[in-house]
């Protein structure tokens, strides 16, 4: 079991409030991603759950038990660090088995568990190597092995893939997701990469400036962003925001339309006219950055190839069913 | 860059410096070698005659030689043990965030900058003096008889002085190493359930293996030649109790005025230093491999 609940969790370093009250319910076995811009407090929140930082106020419940006063090792969670934090003088076997050794398990039992974990992660041939003799992806797997071998109630990942190159990151992303599903262990994963968040998560927590902006499944966040921040943060390229006349007509202070929900019409009269400033042709997609005069720069996405170039005049027509409306305070207007 | 011409240029430009250094090294060595084969006494000038290896036989069979070799090893070994055993906890304390940390660090490092002669004088006259020293005052405070350090426990007194001088060096090297210990590694160990002691044994100590090796190697080089502290305090005595190889060579040359024997002793010291270095590198040197 690994149900984690946060109740009014706050963290302040002196006068600086990093976490301004977080309430969260993480179901057993789910994969939750904390995402947000740097400095939003996502890593701090993870470290509070891990017990590496003390909470200033609030309660953290693991399986219904308040753990704020429990030391990290006793919380039954294990963590994968951004720098992997492998012990450089120990072999892979020593690294993975260190937690078990500290727990006082018998030697042959440690060996059995370490070998089982290594087999899961394809690390068996490297068991007697030192971390410095491994590649980045292998080190990453050792760090994960160290986490799974203790059979924890939950995994905590602190931007574990940010040190890997792009291709390896995609591969490890899939491996981590598959491993988590296979083990059925609760996982909390911190990242600033919204693609990682969207692809890996069962549920995403969007954090901004120490506050939880929205908590929901990836598609919920994409389709029903609760406010301007979430709307702008989730989705790539970013959502277009338009204020003024077009917004007021629809009874909102700001309206948002995703680039993929703008229909591109050559020299059409309706919608928002403008001049293409930059056109990016990816083959599979075409991205147009359109200077729409008083509306500012708008981004439009077309699936497939569209032979339009910089300087061409186009008109962008928003899909009326896909317009997001926001009030003065930046919150979504529903209905 | 590495064309034939630049190589030639580089070599010809380097040649004067290399040549000078070579002469600087080879002339004293050659002269020492030469003197070590002569009967050369300053009390009997003009009577230098070639005596072959007689000086070496004389130096090596002198009972003072074995005694001073033992003293040298005791001194080096004790100071190494003291500086490392005290240096590790001291470095760990200095690594903690405390108010005025920079000033504390500066003060801890200060003894290293005091000249050996001066620090020996301070220890001899202000601290260890059996009548007017601080230690004597302290022992009298408790109603005990003061220790006459340089007569009762001369070697221990020298070891204390030298260890005091070299403790800052060990502390400094170990402190910089501690600061380079990855914070996430300590946290990972904490998550793995390692308490303070296990974390020290399994994470901190292995991390310190390399700096400890550096401390051992560098200190050994300098501790083999400790001289000023002995010269100022005990003068090698009482008897031969605090005479090390360096002091023995000095006494051969400038107390007994026997240059030939002193030269032979100097060459023996070179050989001893190399033997020690050989074993040290074998024992602890593997820690230096990346």
Image (tube, rainbow, N blue to C red):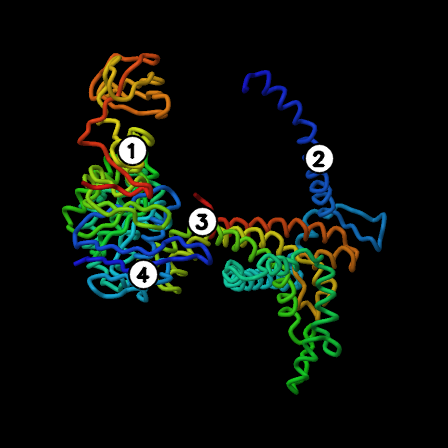
The residue at which mark 3 appears reads as B287
Secondary element at tag 4: helix
Callout 4 environment at 10 Å: few (<14), some (14 to 19), or many (20+)? many
Image quadrant in which you'd find residue B104: bottom right
- Residue B62 screen position, x and y as percent: 67, 61
The answer to the question of whether label 3 and label 4 lie on touching residues, with beta carbons closer than 8 A, is: no
Above/below status of A280 relative to A209: above
Q: Are marks 3 and 4 on the same chain?
A: no
**Front tag of 3 and 1:** 1
The residue at which mark 4 appears reads as A72
**Front tag of 3 and 4:** 4
Callout 1 environment at 10 Å: few (<14), some (14 to 19), or many (20+)? few
- Tag of residue B23: 2
**Front tag of 2 and 4:** 4
Callout 3 environment at 10 Å: few (<14), some (14 to 19), or many (20+)? some
The residue at which mark 1 appears reads as A248
Asked whether, in this view, residue A286 is left or right of residue B154, the answer is: left
């Amino acid at each position: 079991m690994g149900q984690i609940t946060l109740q009014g969790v706050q963290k302040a370093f002196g006068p600086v409030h990093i976490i301004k009250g977080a309430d969260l319910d993480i179901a057993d076995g789910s994969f939750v991603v904390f995402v947000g811009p740097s400095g939003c407090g996502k890593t701090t929140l993870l470290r509070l759950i891990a017990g590496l930082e003390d909470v200033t106020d609030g309660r953290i419940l693991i399986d219904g038990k308040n753990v704020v006063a429990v030391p990290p090792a006793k919380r039954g969670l294990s963590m994968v660090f951004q720098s992997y934090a492998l012990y450089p003088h120990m072999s892979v076997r020593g690294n993975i088995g260190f937690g078990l050794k500290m727990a006082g398990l018998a030697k042959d039992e440690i060996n059995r568990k370490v070998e089982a974990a290594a087999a899961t992660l394809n690390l068996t041939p490297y068991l007697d190597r030192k971390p410095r003799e491994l590649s980045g992806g292998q080190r990453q797997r050792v760090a994960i092995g160290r986490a799974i071998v203790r059979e924890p109630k939950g995994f905590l990942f602190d931007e574990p893939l940010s040190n890997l190159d792009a291709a390896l990151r995609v591969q490890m992303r899939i491996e981590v997701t598959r491993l988590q599903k296979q083990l059925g262990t609760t996982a909390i994963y911190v990242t600033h990469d919204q693609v990682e968040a969207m692809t890996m998560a069962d549920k995403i927590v969007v954090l901004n400036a120490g506050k939880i902006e929205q908590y929901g499944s990836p598609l919920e966040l994409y389709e029903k962003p609760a406010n301007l921040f979430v709307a702008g943060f989730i989705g790539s390229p970013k959502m277009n925001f338009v204020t003024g006349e077009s917004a007021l007509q629809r009874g909102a202070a700001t309206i948002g339309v995703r680039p993929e929900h703008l229909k591109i019409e050559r020299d059409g009269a309706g919608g928002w006219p403008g001049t293409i400033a930059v056109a990016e042709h990816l083959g599979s997609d075409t991205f147009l950055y359109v200077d729409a005069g008083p509306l500012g720069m708008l981004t439009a996405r077309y699936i497939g190839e569209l032979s339009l170039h910089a300087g061409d005049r186009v008109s962008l027509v928003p899909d009326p069913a896909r317009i997001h409306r926001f009030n003065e305070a930046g919150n979504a207007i529903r209905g | 860059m590495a064309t034939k011409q630049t190589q030639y240029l580089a070599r010809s430009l380097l040649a004067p410096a290399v040549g000078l250094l070579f002469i600087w090294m080879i002339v004293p060595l050659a002269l020492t070698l030469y003197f070590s084969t002569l009967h050369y006494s300053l009390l009997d000038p003009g009577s230098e005659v070639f005596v072959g290896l007689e000086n070496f036989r004389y130096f090596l069979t002198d009972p003072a030689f074995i005694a001073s070799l033992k003293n040298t090893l005791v001194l080096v070994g004790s100071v190494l043990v003291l500086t490392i055993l005290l240096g590790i906890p001291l470095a760990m304390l200095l690594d903690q965030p405390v108010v005025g940390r920079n000033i504390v660090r500066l003060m801890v490092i200060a003894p290293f900058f005091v000249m050996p002669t001066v620090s020996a004088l301070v220890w001899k006259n202000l601290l260890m003096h059996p009548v007017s020293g601080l230690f004597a005052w302290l022992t009298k405070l408790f109603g005990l008889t003061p220790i006459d350090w340089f007569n009762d426990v001369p070697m221990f007194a020298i070891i204390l002085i030298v260890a005091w001088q070299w403790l800052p060096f060990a502390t400094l090297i170990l402190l910089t190493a501690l600061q380079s210990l990855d914070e996430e590694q300590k946290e990972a160990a904490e998550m793995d359930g390692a308490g303070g002691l296990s974390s020290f044994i399994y994470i901190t100590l292995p991390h310190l293996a390399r700096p400890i090796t550096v401390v051992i190697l560098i200190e050994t080089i300098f501790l083999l030649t400790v001289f000023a502290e002995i010269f100022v305090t005990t003068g090698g005595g009482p008897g031969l109790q605090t005479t090390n190889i360096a002091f023995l060579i000095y006494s051969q040359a400038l107390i007994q005025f026997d240059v030939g024997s002193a030269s032979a002793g100097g060459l023996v010291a070179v050989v001893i230093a190399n033997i020690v270095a050989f074993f040290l590198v074998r024992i602890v040197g593997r820690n230096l491999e990346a």
